[in-house]
Image (spheres, grey):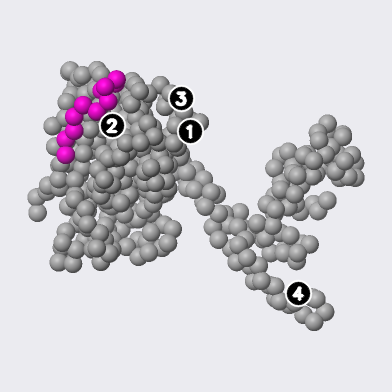
Amino acid sequence: MDSKLKEYATESELRYIAAIEEFGSHGKASKALGVNRASVSKAMKRLKVRAAKQGYAPEHDMTHTAPESHYVKGVSTLYGDEGQIKQQWVKTDIDKQVYQEAIARAIDSACEGIVPLKKTPVPKATVADLATLYTITDFHLGAYCWAVETGDDWDIKIAEKVLVNAISEMAHGSPDSETGIFLQLGDFLHWDGLDAVTPINKNILEADTRYDLLCELAITLSVTVIDILLKKHRSVEVVICEGNHDEAGSVWLRKAIKKLFEKEPRVNVNDTAFPFYAYLHGETLLGFHHGHKVKNKSLPALFAGEPRYRPLWGQATRTYIHTGHYHHTEQDKTEEGGAIVERHNTLAGRDAYATRGGYLSDRRATAVTYHKTKGERSRVIVTPEYEA
């Protein structure tokens, strides 16, 4: 056995390697360990594949490895006349899973010093069977829009006033439901790091501020919204969904809000590390997804079949799934596969990309109130209002 392979091995693979070194073959090692020979052979093949992804496959002249946070996506080798290696180029890229896990660990560590907020007084009377869902999607906090070019002005000052006014107006017009659900349906933040670019394709975005101020404002606004809902409802559920603009931002925002309200028993933050989220209100199931991974028509089957949500689906007599992503409604609502799927509009101003692409959508947000057994009972629709 190549001893360097141990650097890439799991604990079970290390046991197999030790047995192979001691007994001299896969067959003898498997007999000594009391496992099937094929299990040992397959494990060793998987180990070699894993090592090769990191750049280590000496039988193919690959010995220049990538750091733990990266993987090798290509190797080019220049050989001399006698087959010797003259030069070698190793192309690497970031391992997204490792990167996201590192971000999650860093966020958990950063949140350790956050001091939880004080409790808010409980409202005197609420309606036990009702839950009101306040949906904010594609808010693009931090984006900059110039009305002369796009038809809409949008910056962090406008965004702050629009959000607070919208939530306040929706809360005022909705019933005094026992439960309020703050659904932040993804792309709350316009970008996801120090550079104002899209996370995947690195398209340059029009930004209004620096990322550190954007982070501070996102936390402050989220706390403000939750505080408004705590004064209206006996309990508040918080769902902060992953979007395509804020894959990492949604993680740290969710962790920070969870830490801030950990001593407030009336607030529950959904900490699902999965881009599909659900909440069961009596016999009414509410599903949430930004809309960037799976199309609306496929979502009922996903929630019905996903093992972690299958029990909830079985308990529900009515199911409603909410999405965003496209900034506009999709035939208002579709009803198929045992669920009503609704795509929500954005409150945000139209940016240069949407303007130049000819994309149009009404700007609005909706609060929907659901009964435990009878499903949707009422809704309040608001449009952007702010003082210039």
Asked whether the beta carbons under mark 3 and mark 1 sit within 8 Å of each other, the answer is no
**Of the residues under marks 4 and 2, which one precedes in the sequence?**
4
Residue type indicated by callout 4: Ile
Residue depicted at x 35% and y 61%: 196
Residue beneath label 4, please?
85
Residue depicted at x 27% and y 55%: 142
Residue beneath label 1, please?
305
Give the structural element (helix, strand or loop) at label 3: helix
Asked whether the beta carbons under mark 3 and mark 4 sit within 8 Å of each other, the answer is no
Asked whether the beta carbons under mark 2 and mark 1 sit within 8 Å of each other, the answer is no
Residue beneath label 2, please?
181
Residue type indicated by callout 1: Gly
CA distance separating discs 4 and 2:
62 Å
| Residue 313 covered by magenta stretch | no
Q: Position of residue 145 (x, y in %)?
A: 21, 61
Q: Give the label, 4 or 2, closer to the camera.
A: 2
**Of the residues under marks 3 and 4, which one precedes in the sequence?**
4
**Of the residues under marks 2 and 1, which one precedes in the sequence?**
2
Q: Position of residue 117 (x, y in %)?
A: 30, 32
CA distance separating discs 3 and 4:
58 Å
Q: Give the label, 3 or 4, closer to the camera.
A: 3
**Of the residues under marks 3 and 2, which one precedes in the sequence?**
2
Residue type indicated by callout 2: Ile
CA distance separating discs 2 and 1:
24 Å
Left or right? Give the position of 368 relative to 105. Answer: left
CA distance separating discs 4 and 1:
52 Å
Q: Give the label, 3 or 2, closer to the camera.
A: 3
